[in-house]
C-alpha cells in the first residue's frame, strides 16, 4: 500500500485512436500519420438542460465513463462511441479544424468543421449548414453564445500557417465541460483563388480580425475592442487566439511580436460605451443591435513562446482559475478570476495578487474530488500536474492534495507484457511519464517515455452513495476554507483506502470516511500530525516559517490556511513541531468549527434520508457517526434526537455532558407535523436544516422538495421561486385555483413523480397524495402533460401533447413523462386505429363471400372498411355488409331466369342484363363516398382499382356466366366514363391522414398509354389535395397526351388542390383550354365542350372566394357564349359550368365584391329573364378577345338572350354570389310565379332553381318544418292543387298541369334547400320532413305503402310525367342523405334499398336515378360512417354542384352537367368523427359524452348526450365536449365556436387528436363492451361474496365449489394494474388458517375494495405500511423481543394522524373526502395510546429520563433493555416530549422563581407536547414544590 498522501492510478487500457481501427477494418491503408482526434464526454452532445437524459437517436451516447472520439483524416470525420462507429462525415475538401459549439439559445451542440473556403455545421440529428467564407479563416473557437472565427492576416496564405497538432496556436484547447477540442489541419492544403477575389479595397473598414457566428443561418458579426471606454473595430491580427471557454465568455491570446499573453472577456456593448469611429455604426447590419467587444482583463510576458496549453479549473472556493502551461519555464501559471454581479450583469477581472505558479511540465483539468457539484454551468475541476521530477500531483486550486504514482508492480507487469521483449529490460527501470493528454472528466492519457499512451482514471466519485452524499453535503454546507481543510485531511489520510483504486468496495469507502471524522473527534493531534512529515527540515524555508511574523499571520489566518499542505510547493508538506505546538489552541478552535459544520451538514443529510424508505441502511450507518460527533461536541440535544430514532444503537450519555447553551437539532418530521397542524406560518423554521434552505444545494434536494410541497399546501407565500418557509420551489407554469393545484404544479416543476412518492414514508406521502387525488377529477386545461401523468390522467396528457396551444409545456421528453408515472405504468404511446386490409375482422359476419359466385375472392375495393372502429360502431349490425353488397361492382350480378331458357328468355336475359349494367355503372359514385378516406396505401405499391364487371350469372343454371352481346348493345358506351368513376372511387379511399403524397408515387401509377383509370385517379388525388406535389412540367406532360378524360381529371384535381390560391401557373394552364379566351393571334384550337366546361369549373375553384374582377368579367361573358364545336346540345352544360364558376369566384361576396357589382347583377338578370341587351353593357363586359374570336358567339336570337341556355347558370351564379347574405333585393328579383299567367312563361325546372337560389340567399330563414315548406308554394299553386283527385270536371286542365309542374318543382327546390341548410347535421326534424316527402312522391309514382302524407294533394302522376316524378323523388332522397350523411340511418337505408331493388318496369333502369341512389347510399355511410358534410360557404357550393337537379340519362351523358362534377362533394366533407380510446389498453371503447352547442337562430344553447364513436356538430356551433358517465374519469374540452372549417387530420391544433379522444377508465368499473348494463361493475356485491373466503375451511373437499372465482380473477376484470392483481394473489388468497392470518386477509380484502372502488390503487402501499407499523408495535408489546432498531415508522404515523386532523378540521379539503378512512387512522391512534399507556415501568423510566436524561440500561438482560428503550422512544416520539435539557431548564426556572406548576402553564410552555405527557411533567415539577 502507498504511504500517506500517495495514490495509485488505475490503468484502463493502452490508448490508440479508435479511428485507426475503423480505417483498418475498412481496408484503408494510409502510410502517413496525418490525422488528428478529439476526445470528449458523452454528455456534450446532449441538450443543454437535459444532461441527465439520453439522446433520442443514440442510447449509447450516455454510457457512464465512456469517451467519445472524433477522428479526423483529410476530408473525413469518424464519430465513435467506444467500440462503435456512431456517425461518419465526408466533406468536399480537407478539414482544418473541428470543434463543438452551442450557438445562441440552441440547446443542442453542433459540430463545426472549418475548411479552406467554407464552414460546415452539423447537427446531431443530421442537419447540415454550409457557410461560404469570404475571407480566409485560420481557426474556430467555441464561446457560450456562438462560434469565434479567427481571420488570417491580410496577404497571408493558409498554406504558410502551420496547423499541425504540435502548433500551440491550435492544439491548445480547453477540456472544460466534458470535452476537448484539438486543432487539426492537413499538411498539404490548397487555397482556391476565388476566395481572395472577394476582398474589397475597404476591407479594413468592414471586417474585423475576429468574427462571431451566433446562428448557422445568419452572417458572422464583426467584433470590437474596448480602448479607454470607447469601442473600436477589432483589428488585432497579431493577437492569435490560443484558447476560449465554451461556458464563460473568455479568450486567451498570444502576441508574438510583444511576446505576451492576454486574457480577454467577450461582452455585449453597454450604453456608456461609444464608438470612436462615427462610421462604426454603419458596419452593423440593420436589426443587429448588440455589439460584441473584447475587453482585456490581464496581460503578461510569461515566456518568449506561447503557452502550450490553456485550460480552466476551479479553486477550492469554486472560483474559476485560468491555467497557462509554459513548458519553456516548466511551470503552470494560474490566474484567479474574480467575477462581480453589477446591475444583474457579471463583470470579470483579474488582480495582480490573484496569481501563482506551480512547477509543471504537463498539466490538465480533471474531475476528481468534486464530481457532482456545479456552479451554474461550471463544473468543478481539479488540476493534475506533472512536475519536472516526473511526479504527478493533484491540486484543488492552490491546495496540493496528494501524489499519484504508477500502478503497483502487478499492474506494471501487465503494462510491460504489452511491450516488445527487447524493450522490457530497459523500460522496467526507466518507465516515466513525460506528458498528460486528452483529459476527459476523471480520465487522462499518460504518455510514457517509451512512446506509448495509456488511458488512466482517477478516483472519480465514491461508489458508496452515503459517502458521496456526505462529502457533497460538506462541500455545499461548509465554507470553502473549512472544506479545503477537510479535503486535505481526507486525501492525506493513510486509511482512505477507497481513494487508492477505482474498484474499492462501498463499505470500505464508508469506513475510510468515518475514520477521518472520528480521528478529528478522538485524536486530533494524531490526525494533524498524520498530515505532516516525520522529518524536520532545517532549511531557510523552515526559518521563515518559525518567524514571529509568520506565527502571527498563521494564527490570524488559520482557517484559510490551516492545513500545512496548502502551499503550492511540496516543501509545504514539511512543517516544524514547534509551530504546531504554538498554534495548538487555534487549531483546536478550527477543528471544533470544522466538526460543528460537519455535524450540521451531515445532520441535514440524515434528516433527508429519513424521508427515503430505501435508504434505511445508510441511515443506520450515518447515525452512528453523527452520534460520535455530537458526543464529542457535547451536543446533548442532538444525541437525544438520535436516541429517539434509534434507541438500540446509540450509547448512553449523562447530564454532566450538558452545555450551558446547547443547540436544538432540526427535525423535518417535526416541521412537517407542525405545518399540517398549524399551517406553514406557525411551523418553526429552526426545525429546517440550514443546508435545505441554502440555495443551489443538490444533495438535500429530496428534503427541500418535500418541505416546499408542504409549504405550498399549507399556505406559504411565494416570491418568485422563494417561499416564505425559507426554501425554493420550481413551479411549473399553469393555472391554479387551489393550494392543491399549486402543489401539483410544484411537483411537476421539481420533476417529482409517482415513483418518488412511493419512496416517501407512508404518512409523509399522504398530504401529497391528497393534493393529487383532489386535482385528479377536474384539473385545469392548460397544464403541462407531465402534470396529468402525475395525476394518473394519461388521457389528458396525450390529449394535450397533441395540442401545444392549450398549455405551456415544459421540456419533458417521453422518457421524462414515464419517469413521473408509477414504475408499473404502461408506456405512453399514441394510439393509431388500424384501418388497413390486415385489420379486417376475420369473422363470418364481415366476409362478403357469395356462395353462388365463381369469383367470391375478387377484390371489390371495400375489404378494408371492416376495422376495429367500424366494429365498435356497428357491432353485430350487418348494415356495412349490406352496403358493401349493394355497392359491389366487381362481381357478376345475379339474373333470375327459368332453368330451361328459350330463345325469348335469352333476349330477356340480355335486356335484363343491360338494365342491370346501367345500375352497375352507377355504383362507383356511391362506393367512392362509402370508402372515402379509409385506407393508407403503401407508397411502394401501385393503387389497386377493382374491376367493373358488367357480366351476369345465372343461379338457376349453375352460375353460368352471361356477357352483353356487342351486336345488340354498344358496350363501349358503358366502359369509358364508368371506368373513370370507378378509378375515382378507388382513389378516394386514400386517407388524408397519409399526409403529403409523393410525386414519385403518382408518376409510378402513370400508365404507358393514357387511360380513363389514371384520369380518375388524378381527379381523386386532386380532391384530396395531393396534386400539389406535381411540377409544372409534369402537368403539361399530362396535357400533351391530349386525352380527354385525363385532361378533365387533371384540371379539376389541380383546381381542387390549389383551391382559392389563384396560383398563376395553374391559372394559365386552365385558360389554355378555353378557346374563347385566346387572343386573335393565337392559333385555332379545337377542344371538346366537355374539356372547356371542366376548365371553367376549375377556374372557379382556383379563384374561389377571391372576387377577382377580371376573372368574374370573363366568366360572366362565358355564361352567354356558345361553346366551341358543333354540339349544340351541350350549350346548357357550358353555361351552367360558367355560372357555377362565377358563383365560386364571388362566393358569398355579392355585397362587398367589387364596385360594379350592380352592373354585373343586371347582366345576370338579363340572362335569366331574357330582356334586350344594350350595346354599352355588352361592350363593358366583353373582353378584347371576344371581338377577334373566330369560333364563338353570343347565345342570342337577335338582341334577345336564349334564357333556356343561360338562365340556369345565371341563377346558380346569383345564388352562390349572395349565399347567406340575406339580400332582400336580390330575392325580390328572383320571384316565383304568383299567377297562372306567369306560370305559362316559366319553365318548371327554372322554378326549382329559383326556389333554391332564394333559400340559399335567405339562409337563416330556412326551417325544418312543414309550414316552412308550404310557405314556399305560391298561393295560386297551392289553391290550384287542392282539388286534385276530385272527379268533377276541370275546364282549365292545361292550367292545372302547369300548376302541378310548378308545385312539384317548388317542393323539390325546398327539399334541396333544406338538405343543404342542414347538411351533415342529422337534424331529426329535417330528416322526418324529407322522408315524408320522399314517401309522398314514391306513392304518387306507384302506391307502395300507407304514409302519413295527409293534407298533401293526390294524383300528381296524372299531370306530371313519370320521369319528372322519378327525378324529384331521387333529388329529395339525395337531400335526405346529405342531412343524414355518415349516420347510417336505418330507416333511410331501408328506403334506399327499396328504391334500388325496384324492377325495370318501375323505372330502375334509368341511369340518373341509379346514380342518385348509389350516391345516396354512399352519403348515408360517408367514409364508412366517419365523415360528414359541412355547411360552410365553400361546402354548400360543392354540394350544390354535386346535387345539380339535372340527372344524366346515360353513363356518357355530359350535356347539361358534367358527370365528373358529381365527385365534388369531397370538398364539402369533414372528418368530425370522434372515437374514444382507453389510454391503458389502447383499444377503442364506448364512452358517453355530453356535447354542448351554442345558441343559434333555431335553438337555444343545448347539451345532448352521445355515445362514442360518434360525429360532432360543426365547429361554428360546437362549444364543449365532456366525457361523462360513472365509469371513466371526466374531462372537458372547451372550444371557441368559429366560422371555420373543421380541423384537418394531423393538425397539431386539432383538439381531438385527429379524431381520437383518450379516456381513462376508473378502477372498479368494466368497459361498456364487457358490461353493457353495468351488472358486473357492482364491485361491492362481488367483494361481499368473496368475503366468504376469509372464513375457516370446515367443509369437505367434496362440497367445495369447483367453479369459484378467485379474488385476483375478479380484480383483473376491473383493472389491468399488475400491482392490484399481484396484491390479490398474494394477500387475499384463502389459504389462511390462523386467526391472525384470517384477520390480515380480511383487512386486505377490505383495503382492496376501498382502493378499487375509489380508484386509489396507490393507497394499498399506505394502508399496508400503517397496518404493519401498528402490527409491529403490538408484536413487540406482547412478545419478549423487538425486531426493529428504529422508530421512524411511528413518526410517519404521527404525520398521518396530523393529516387526518387537518382534513377533519377543514384545513385540507377534498370533495371525495380524505384518501384514507378517518376511522382507520383514528383506530390506529387509539391502539397506539393504549399500548403506550399499558407499557410496564413506563412511569419510572419516564421519570428517570426527565430527571437525568437516562435511558434504561442493559442490567444483564439485553432483550428487556432493548424493549424498554424502544417503548420509551415510542412514548417520547408519540407524545412529543421535550428534551431533558429543556425540561431541566424549565425546572430550574420553577425552583428559582418559585412558580406553582400546572397543566395549563405547562401546556403553554410545551405547546407541542401531548396532554398525557404534560401530566407526567406536571407531577415531576410538582415534586419540587413538595421538596420546597
Image: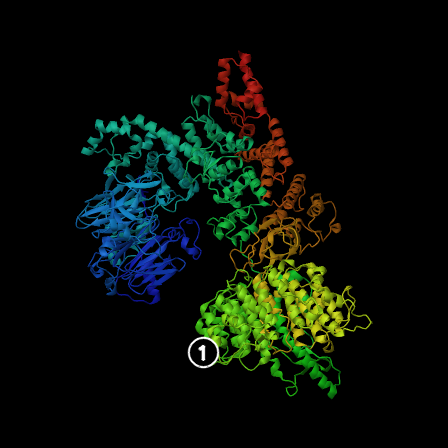
Residue lying furthest top in this view?
1828
Residue 1817 coordinates in the image, percent (x, y): 55, 21
Q: Which residue is more in the foreground, 1445 or 1464?
A: 1445
Label 1: element kind: loop
Determine the residue positioned at 40% across, 49% down.
Answer: 48
Q: Quadrant of residue 1375?
A: bottom right
Residue 754 coordinates in the image, percent (x, y): 53, 45
Q: Which residue is more in the foreground, 343 or 261?
A: 343
Determine the residue positioned at 67% across, 55% down.
Answer: 1570
The residue labelled by disc 1 is 1080
Which quarter of the rendering shows the N terminus? top left
Left or right: residue 86 versus residue 927 is left
Examine the rendering and report whether any part of residue 1286 can be seen.
yes
Q: Which residue is more in the foreground, 1036 or 663?
A: 1036
Q: Quadrant of residue 230?
A: top left
Above or below — where is 1421 with respect to 447? Answer: below
Residue 1246 coordinates in the image, percent (x, y): 64, 70
Near mark 1 (Cα within 10 A), the count class, few <14, some 14-19 or many ≥20, is some
Left or right: residue 360 versus residue 1086 is left
Residue lying furthest right in this view?
1287
Amino acid at each position: 500500500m502507498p504511504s500517506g498522501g500517495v495514490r495509485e492510478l488505475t490503468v484502463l487500457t493502452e490508448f490508440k485512436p479508435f479511428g485507426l481501427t475503423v480505417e483498418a477494418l475498412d481496408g484503408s491503408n494510409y502510410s502517413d500519420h496525418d490525422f488528428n482526434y478529439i476526445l470528449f464526454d458523452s454528455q456534450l452532445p446532449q441538450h443543454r438542460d437535459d444532461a441527465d437524459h439520453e439522446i433520442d437517436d443514440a442510447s449509447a451516447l450516455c454510457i457512464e465513463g465512456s469517451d467519445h472520439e472524433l477522428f479526423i483524416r483529410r476530408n473525413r470525420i469518424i464519430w465513435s462511441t467506444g467500440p462503435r462507429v456512431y456517425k461518419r462525415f465526408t466533406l468536399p475538401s480537407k478539414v482544418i479544424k473541428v470543434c463543438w459549439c452551442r450557438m445562441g439559445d440552441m440547446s443542442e451542440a453542433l459540430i463545426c468543421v472549418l475548411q479552406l473556403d467554407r464552414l460546415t455545421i452539423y447537427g446531431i440529428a443530421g442537419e447540415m449548414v454550409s457557410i461560404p467564407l469570404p475571407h480566409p479563416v485560420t481557426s474556430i473557437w467555441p464561446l457560450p453564445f456562438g462560434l469565434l472565427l479567427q481571420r488570417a492576416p491580410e496577404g497571408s496564405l493558409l498554406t504558410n500557417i502551420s496547423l499541425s497538432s504540435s502548433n500551440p496556436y491550435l492544439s491548445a484547447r480547453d477540456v472544460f465541460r466534458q470535452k476537448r477540442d484539438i486543432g487539426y489541419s492537413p499538411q498539404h492544403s490548397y487555397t482556391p483563388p476565388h476566395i481572395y477575389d472577394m476582398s474589397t479595397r475597404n476591407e479594413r473598414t468592414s471586417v474585423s480580425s475576429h468574427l462571431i457566428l451566433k446562428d448557422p443561418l445568419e452572417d458572422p458579426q464583426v467584433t470590437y475592442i474596448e480602448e479607454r471606454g470607447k469601442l473600436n473595430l477589432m483589428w488585432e491580427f497579431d493577437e492569435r487566439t490560443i484558447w476560449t471557454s465554451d461556458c464563460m465568455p473568455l479568450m486567451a491570446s498570444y502576441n508574438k511580436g510583444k511576446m505576451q499573453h492576454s486574457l480577454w472577456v467577450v461582452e455585449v456593448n453597454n450604453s456608456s460605451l461609444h464608438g470612436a469611429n462615427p462610421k462604426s455604426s454603419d458596419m452593423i447590419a440593420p436589426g443587429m443591435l448588440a455589439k460584441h467587444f473584447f475587453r482585456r482583463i490581464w496581460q503578461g510576458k510569461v515566456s518568449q513562446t506561447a503557452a502550450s496549453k490553456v485550460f480552466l479549473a476551479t479553486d477550492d472556493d469554486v472560483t474559476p482559475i485560468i491555467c497557462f502551461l509554459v513548458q519553456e519555464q516548466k511551470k503552470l501559471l494560474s490566474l484567479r478570476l474574480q467575477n462581480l454581479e453589477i446591475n444583474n450583469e457579471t463583470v470579470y477581472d483579474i488582480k495582480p495578487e490573484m496569481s501563482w505558479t506551480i512547477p509543471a511540465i504537463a498539466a490538465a483539468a480533471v474531475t476528481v474530488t468534486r464530481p457532482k457539484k456545479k456552479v451554474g454551468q461550471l463544473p468543478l475541476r481539479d488540476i493534475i500536474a506533472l512536475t519536472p521530477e516526473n511526479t504527478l500531483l493533484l491540486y484543488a486550486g492552490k491546495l496540493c492534495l496528494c501524489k499519484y504514482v504508477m500502478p503497483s508492480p502487478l499492474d506494471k507487469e501487465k503494462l510491460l507484457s504489452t511491450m516488445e521483449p527487447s524493450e522490457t529490460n530497459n523500460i522496467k527501470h526507466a518507465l516515466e511519464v513525460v506528458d498528460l493528454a486528452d483529459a476527459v472528466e476523471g480520465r487522462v492519457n499518460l504518455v510514457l517515455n517509451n512512446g506509448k499512451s495509456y488511458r488512466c482514471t482517477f478516483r472519480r466519485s465514491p461508489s458508496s452513495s452515503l459517502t458521496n452524499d456526505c462529502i457533497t453535503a460538506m462541500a455545499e454546507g461548509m465554507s470553502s476554507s473549512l472544506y479545503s481543510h477537510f479535503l486535505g485531511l481526507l486525501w492525506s489520510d493513510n486509511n482512505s483506502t477507497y481513494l487508492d483504486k477505482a474498484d474499492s468496495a462501498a463499505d470500505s469507502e464508508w469506513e475510510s470516511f468515518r475514520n477521518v471524522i472520528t480521528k478529528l473527534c478522538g485524536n486530533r493531534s494524531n490526525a494533524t500530525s498524520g498530515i505532516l512529515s516525520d522529518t524536520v527540515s532545517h532549511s531557510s524555508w523552515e526559518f521563515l516559517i518559525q518567524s514571529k511574523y509568520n506565527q502571527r499571520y498563521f494564527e490570524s489566518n488559520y482557517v484559510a490556511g490551516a492545513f500545512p499542505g496548502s502551499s503550492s510547493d511540496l516543501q509545504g508538506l514539511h512543517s516544524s513541531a514547534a509551530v504546531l505546538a504554538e498554534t495548538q489552541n487555534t487549531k483546536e478552535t478550527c477543528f471544533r468549527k470544522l466538526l460543528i459544520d460537519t455535524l450540521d451538514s451531515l445532520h441535514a443529510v440524515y434528516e433527508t434520508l429519513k424521508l427515503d424508505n430505501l435508504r434505511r441502511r445508510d441511515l443506520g450507518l450515518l447515525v452512528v457517526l453523527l452520534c460520535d460527533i455530537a458526543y464529542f461536541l457535547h451536543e446533548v440535544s442532538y444525541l437525544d434526537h438520535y436516541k429517539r430514532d434509534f434507541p438500540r444503537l446509540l450509547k448512553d450519555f449523562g447530564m454532566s455532558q450538558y452545555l450551558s447553551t446547547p443547540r436544538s437539532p432540526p427535525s423535518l418530521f417535526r416541521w412537517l407535523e407542525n405545518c399540517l397542524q398549524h399551517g406553514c406560518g406557525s411551523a418553526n423554521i429552526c426545525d429546517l436544516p440550514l443546508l435545505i434552505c441554502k440555495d443551489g444545494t443538490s444533495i438535500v434536494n429530496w428534503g427541500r422538495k418535500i418541505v416546499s410541497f408542504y409549504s405550498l399546501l399549507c399556505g406559504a407565500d411565494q416570491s418568485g421561486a422563494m417561499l416564505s418557509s425559507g426554501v425554493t420551489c420550481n413551479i411549473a407554469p399553469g393555472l391554479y385555483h387551489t393550494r392543491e393545484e399549486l402543489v401539483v404544479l410544484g411537483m411537476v416543476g421539481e420533476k417529482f413523480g409517482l415513483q418518488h412518492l412511493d419512496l416517501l414514508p407512508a404518512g409523509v406521502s399522504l398530504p401529497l397524495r391528497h393534493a393529487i387525488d383532489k386535482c385528479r377529477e377536474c384539473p385545469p386545461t392548460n397544464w403541462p402533460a407531465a402534470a396529468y401523468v402525475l395525476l394518473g390522467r394519461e388521457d389528458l396528457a396525450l390529449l394535450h401533447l397533441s395540442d401545444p396551444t392549450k398549455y405551456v409545456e415544459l421540456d419533458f421528453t417521453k422518457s421524462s413523462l414515464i419517469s413521473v408515472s408509477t414504475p408499473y405504468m404502461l408506456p405512453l404511446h399514441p394510439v393509431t386505429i388500424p384501418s388497413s386490409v390486415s385489420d379486417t375482422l376475420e369473422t363470418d359476419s364481415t366476409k362478403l363471400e357469395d356462395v353462388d359466385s365463381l369469383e367470391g375472392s375478387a377484390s371489390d375495393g371495400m375489404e378494408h372498411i371492416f376495422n376495429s372502429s367500424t366494429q365498435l360502431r356497428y357491432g353485430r349490425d350487418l348494415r356495412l355488409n349490406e352496403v358493401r353488397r349493394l355497392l359491389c361492382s366487381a362481381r357478376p350480378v345475379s339474373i333470375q331466369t327459368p332453368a330451361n331458357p328459350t330463345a325469348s328468355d335469352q333476349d330477356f336475359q340480355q335486356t335484363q342484363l343491360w338494365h342491370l349494367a346501367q345500375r352497375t355503372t352507377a355504383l362507383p359514385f356511391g362506393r367512392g363516398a362509402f370508402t372515402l378516406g379509409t385506407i393508407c396505401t403503401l407508397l411502394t405499391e401501385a393503387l389497386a382499382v377493382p374491376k367493373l364487371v358488367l357480366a351476369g350469372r345465372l343461379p338457376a343454371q349453375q352460375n353460368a356466366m352471361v356477357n352483353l352481346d356487342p351486336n345488340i348493345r354498344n358496350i363501349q358506351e358503358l366502359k369509358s366514363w364508368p371506368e373513370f368513376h370507378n378509378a375515382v372511387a378507388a382513389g378516394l379511399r386514400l386517407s388524408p391522414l397519409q399526409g403529403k403524397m409523393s410525386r414519385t408515387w403518382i408518376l409510378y401509377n402513370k400508365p404507358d398509354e393514357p387511360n380513363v383509370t389514371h384520369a380518375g385517379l388524378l381527379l381523386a388525388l386532386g380532391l384530396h389535395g395531393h396534386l400539389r406535389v406535381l411540377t409544372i412540367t409534369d402537368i403539361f406532360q399530362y396535357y400533351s397526351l391530349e386525352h380527354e378524360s385525363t385532361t378533365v381529371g387533371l384540371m379539376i384535381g389541380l383546381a381542387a388542390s390549389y383551391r382559392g390560391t389563384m396560383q398563376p401557373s395553374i391559372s394559365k394552364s386552365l385558360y389554355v383550354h378555353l378557346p374563347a379566351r385566346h387572343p386573335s393571334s393565337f392559333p385555332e384550337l379545337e377542344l371538346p365542350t366537355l374539356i372547356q366546361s371542366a376548365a371553367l369549373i376549375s377556374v372557379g375553384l382556383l379563384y374561389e372566394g377571391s372576387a377577382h374582377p377580371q376573372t368574374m368579367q370573363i366568366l360572366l361573358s362565358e355564361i352567354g357564349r356558345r361553346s366551341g364545336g358543333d354540339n349544340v346540345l351541350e350549350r346548357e352544360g357550358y353555361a351552367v359550368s360558367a355560372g357555377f364558376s362565377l358563383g365560386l369566384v364571388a362566393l358569398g361576396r355579392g355585397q362587398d365584391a367589387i364596385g360594379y357589382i350592380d352592373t354585373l347583377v343586371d347582366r345576370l338578370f338579363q340572362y335569366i329573364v331574357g330582356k334586350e341587351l344594350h350595346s354599352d353593357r355588352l361592350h363593358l363586359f366583353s373582353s378584347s378577345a371576344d371581338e377577334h374570336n373566330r369560333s364563338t358567339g353570343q347565345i342570342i336570337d337577335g338582341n334577345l338572350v336564349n334564357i333556356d341556355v343561360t338562365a340556369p347558370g345565371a341563377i346558380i351564379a346569383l345564388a352562390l354570389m349572395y349565399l347567406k347574405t340575406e339580400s332582400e333585393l336580390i330575392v325580390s328579383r328572383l320571384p316565383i310565379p304568383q299567377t297562372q299567367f306567369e306560370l305559362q312563361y316559366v319553365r318548371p325546372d327554372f322554378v326549382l332553381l329559383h326556389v333554391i337560389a332564394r333559400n340559399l340567399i335567405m339562409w337563416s330563414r330556412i326551417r325544418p318544418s312543414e309550414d316552412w315548406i308550404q310557405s314556399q308554394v305560391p298561393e295560386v299553386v297551392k289553391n290550384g292543387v287542392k282539388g286534385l283527385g276530385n272527379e268533377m270536371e276541370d275546364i282549365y286542365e292545361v292550367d292545372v298541369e302547369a300548376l302541378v309542374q310548378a308545385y312539384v318543382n317548388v317542393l323539390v327546390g325546398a327539399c334541396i334547400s333544406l338538405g343543404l341548410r342542414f347538411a351533415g347535421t342529422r337534424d331529426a326534424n329535417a330528416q322526418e320532413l324529407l322522408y315524408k316527402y320522399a314517401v309522398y312522391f314514391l306513392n304518387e309514382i306507384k302506391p307502395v305503402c300507407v304514409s302519413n302524407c295527409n293534407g298533401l294533394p293526390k294524383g300528381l302522376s296524372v299531370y306530371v310525367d313519370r320521369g319528372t316524378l322519378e327525378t324529384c323523388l331521387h333529388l329529395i332522397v339525395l337531400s335526405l342523405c346529405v342531412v343524414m350523411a355518415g349516420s347510417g340511418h336505418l330507416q333511410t337505408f331501408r328506403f334506399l334499398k327499396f328504391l334500388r331493388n325496384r324492377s325495370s318496369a318501375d323505372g330502375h333502369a334509368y341511369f340518373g336515378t341509379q346514380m342518385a341512389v348509389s350516391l345516396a347510399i354512399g352519403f348515408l355511410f360517408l367514409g364508412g360512417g366517419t365523415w360528414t358534410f359541412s355547411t360552410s360557404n365553400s361546402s354548400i357550393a360543392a354540394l350544390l354542384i354535386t346535387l345539380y337537379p339535372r340527372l344524366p340519362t346515360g353513363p356518357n351523358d355530359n350535356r347539361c352537367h358534367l358527370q365528373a362534377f358529381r365527385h365534388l362533394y369531397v370538398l364539402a366533407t369533414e372528418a368530425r368523427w370522434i372515437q374514444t380510446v382507453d389510454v391503458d389498453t389502447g383499444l377503442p371503447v364506448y364512452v358517453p359524452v355530453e356535447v354542448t352547442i351554442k345558441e343559434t337562430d333555431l335553438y337555444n344553447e343545448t347539451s345532448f348526450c352521445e355515445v362514442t364513436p360518434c360525429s360532432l356538430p360543426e365547429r361554428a356551433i360546437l362549444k364543449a365536449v365532456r366525457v361523462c358517465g360513472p365509469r371513466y374519469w371526466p374531462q372537458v374540452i372547451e372550444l371557441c365556436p368559429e366560422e371555420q372549417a373543421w380541423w384537418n387530420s394531423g393538425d397539431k391544433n386539432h383538439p381531438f387528436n385527429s379524431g381520437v379522444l383518450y379516456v381513462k377508465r376508473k378502477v372498479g368499473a368494466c368497459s361498456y363492451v364487457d358490461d353493457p348494463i353495468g351488472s358486473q361493475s357492482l364491485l361491492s356485491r362481488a367483494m361481499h361474496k368473496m368475503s366468504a373466503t376469509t372464513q375457516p375451511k370446515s367443509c369437505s373437499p367434496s362440497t367445495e365449489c369447483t367453479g369459484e372465482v378467485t379474488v385476483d380473477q375478479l380484480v383483473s376484470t376491473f383493472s389491468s394494474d399488475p400491482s392490484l392483481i399481484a396484491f390479490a394473489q398474494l394477500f387475499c388468497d384463502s389459504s389462511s388458517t390462523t386467526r391472525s392470518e384470517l384477520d390480515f386477509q380480511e383487512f386486505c380484502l377490505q383495503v382492496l375494495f376501498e382502493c378499487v372502488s375509489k380508484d386509489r390503487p396507490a393507497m394499498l402501499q399506505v394502508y399496508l405500511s400503517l397496518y404493519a407499523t401498528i402490527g409491529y408495535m403490538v408484536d413487540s408489546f406482547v412478545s419478549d423481543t423487538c425486531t426493529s432498531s428504529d422508530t421512524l415508522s411511528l413518526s410517519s404515523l404521527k404525520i398521518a394522524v396530523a393529516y387526518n386532523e387537518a382534513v377533519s378540521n377543514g384545513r385540507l379539503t377534498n370533495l371525495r373526502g380524505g384518501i384514507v378512512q378517518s376511522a382507520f387512522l383514528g383506530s390506529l391512534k387509539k391502539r397506539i395510546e393504549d399500548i403506550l399507556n399499558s407499557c410496564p415501568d413506563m412511569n419510572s423510566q419516564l421519570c428517570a429520563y426527565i430527571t437525568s436524561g437516562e435511558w434504561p440500561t442493559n442490567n444483564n438482560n439485553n432483550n428487556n433493555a432493548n424493549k424498554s428503550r424502544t417503548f420509551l422512544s415510542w412514548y417520547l416520539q408519540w407524545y412529543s416530549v421535550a428534551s431533558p435539557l429543556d425540561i431541566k431548564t424549565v425546572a430550574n426556572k420553577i425552583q428559582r422563581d418559585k412558580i406553582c406548576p400546572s397543566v395549563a402553564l405547562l401546556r403553554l410552555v410545551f405547546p407541542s407536547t401531548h396532554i398525557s405527557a404534560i401530566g407526567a411533567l406536571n407531577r415531576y415539577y410538582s415534586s419540587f414544590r413538595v421538596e420546597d
